[in-house]
Amino acid sequence: MDFEEYKQKLPVNYSEEDLKIIKKAFEIASEIHKSEKRITGEPYIIHPIEVSLKAAELKMDAGAISAALLHDTEETKNGTLKKIRRELGEEIAFLVKSVTKASEVRYHGAERSAESARKMFMAMAQDIRVIIVKLLDRLHNLETLSVHPSEKQKRIANETLELYAAVADRLGMGDLKVKLEDAAFKYAFPKEYLKITKEVSEKISERERFLSRKITPRLKQVLAEEKISVKEISHRAKHYYSLWKKLERFNNDWQMIYDLSAVRIIVDSLEKCYLVLGIIHKLWKPIPGKIKDYIALPKQNGYQSLHTTVFCEGGKVTEFQIRTQEMHDEAEQGIAAHWAYKISQKPDHSKEKPRKKFNWIKQLREWHDKFYNGENGEDFLEALKIDFFKDRVFILTPKGDIIDLPDGATPVDFAYKIHTDLGNSMVSVKINGRIVPFSYRLASGDMVEIITQKNKKASEKMLGFAKTTQAKEHIREAIRKKE
Ligand code: MN
């Protein structure tokens, strides 16, 4: 493929200046990979090209596109980095180096994945484009995995499910997450994959008919009567891997799968989300406890939407998801939406506010520098699993500020999250006005009031109540100081 052909495939109108950069990256990559072939027999360059086109689909900037084109060059030939630095500058050289670094791990077993997790997070904390290219690289590798021996397929697929998909989820990149999961599912659990796809194809058509003939028309009619315009009503089948996980949780009881195919409604304003929710509840009875307001309380990864599950005609249970276009784009692309390329502009830094949601990236780096001593990758991974991947709970301060903590956190974690002194001097705690023990497991919506005493010092006992690395570290430090 020459550059003119490649340019035609780019889904974004990049500026002349950007195209110059991309062209140079394209030429360097083509030159380096020119005599290489993939196992499939295709020219190697197809792989970086496909990865870069996926990045372009996410509207990534010229730097990211170039890094995607060049991401395997340094592995092939040492010394290309110098050339890249000379021709394309420090920033792109840094991206290429970081992507390479994130993949250079060659350990085995658990040690290997702990170590690659660590490298990946470190690279990610420096520039989010590194991790996006890395995830897209993995996706393309999965899409072309069938030519590899089954042992390798399994290893790559498992690593994807455990690590890469979890990272995509954490970055709010819902679309990429399900693509990674479904592509890996096939190789990680081939039998289960076959079974689920077969069962779904049998069940889904009946379900889809019900939604498109009964539910959608009824909803449209009522919305029209109420003069509420919506941008889009659609329904899409649940993805295989998440469906399988859910079925496992419910002992294979299909009756429990309300969202085999959920109805998604996209509206043009936030107020309308709630209006439409009201209409749905007027039409059909909601299931208590199934109404989720992720607009007022977004998920930790930034996901926003209203969810409700209702009893429709004939007692059939249906899930609805209501959101604005902007929320929808973010739900699909997550952090990449903030890098979205605006024609003839640099990445969109005007959206500074949503970026605040990703403060944890900075946090992660600080905490890595502090706790990782280069010897024990396992500890780091363990800490990551607890602090980073686990679900979050949202806790209120007496002033009404929202503090988010990992699920399973205690009032001690809460106190240390607010301030070290508050943690060190806490003597008791009230949740929603009632005194509770330090071991209390916080739940979303709890209002926590920490009662302190002057001159109180942190003690060994407190360590037993702390779940987060941050709180434990502060307590240990306070004990050390005391001694
Ligand atoms: Mn690659």
Image (cartoon, rainbow, N blue to C red):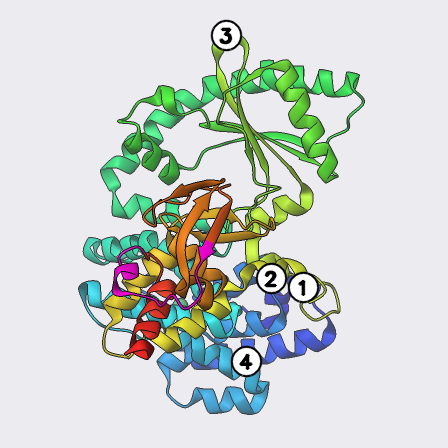
Name the quadrant of the C terminus.
bottom left
Percent of width and height locating residue 88: 58, 85
Mark 1 or 3 closer to N-term?
Answer: 3
Percent of width and height locating residue 267: 71, 35
Position above or below: 233 against 408:
above
Q: Residue at image x 67%, y 74%?
A: 19
Left or right: residue 405 compared with residue 152: right
Query: What amino acid is found at the position of numbered circle 1 in the picture?
Result: Glu
Left or right: residue 351 compared with residue 51: right
Q: Nearer the viewer, mark 1 or mark 4?
A: 1
Mark 2 or 3 closer to N-term?
Answer: 3
**In front: 20, or 123?**
123
* Residue 45 visible in the shown view: no
Q: Are marks 1 and 2 in contact (CB under 8 Å)?
A: yes
Magenta stretch in the rendered image = 451-465
| Residue 462 counted in the magenta span | yes
**In front: 337, or 283?**
283
Mark 3 or 4 closer to N-term?
Answer: 4
Q: Taking the image as four quarters, which one is ligand 1 found in?
A: bottom left
Percent of width and height locating residue 385: 33, 57
Q: Which residue is mark 1?
A: 352
Measure how far apart labels 1 and 2 are at the Cα level: 7 Å
Q: Residue at image x 38%, y 44%?
A: 182
Position above or below: 208 against 420:
above
Measure how far apart labels 1 and 4 are at the Cα level: 23 Å
Query: What amino acid is found at the position of numbered circle 3 in the picture?
Result: Gly
Measure how far apart labels 4 and 2 are at the Cα level: 25 Å
Measure how far apart labels 3 and 4 are at the Cα level: 59 Å
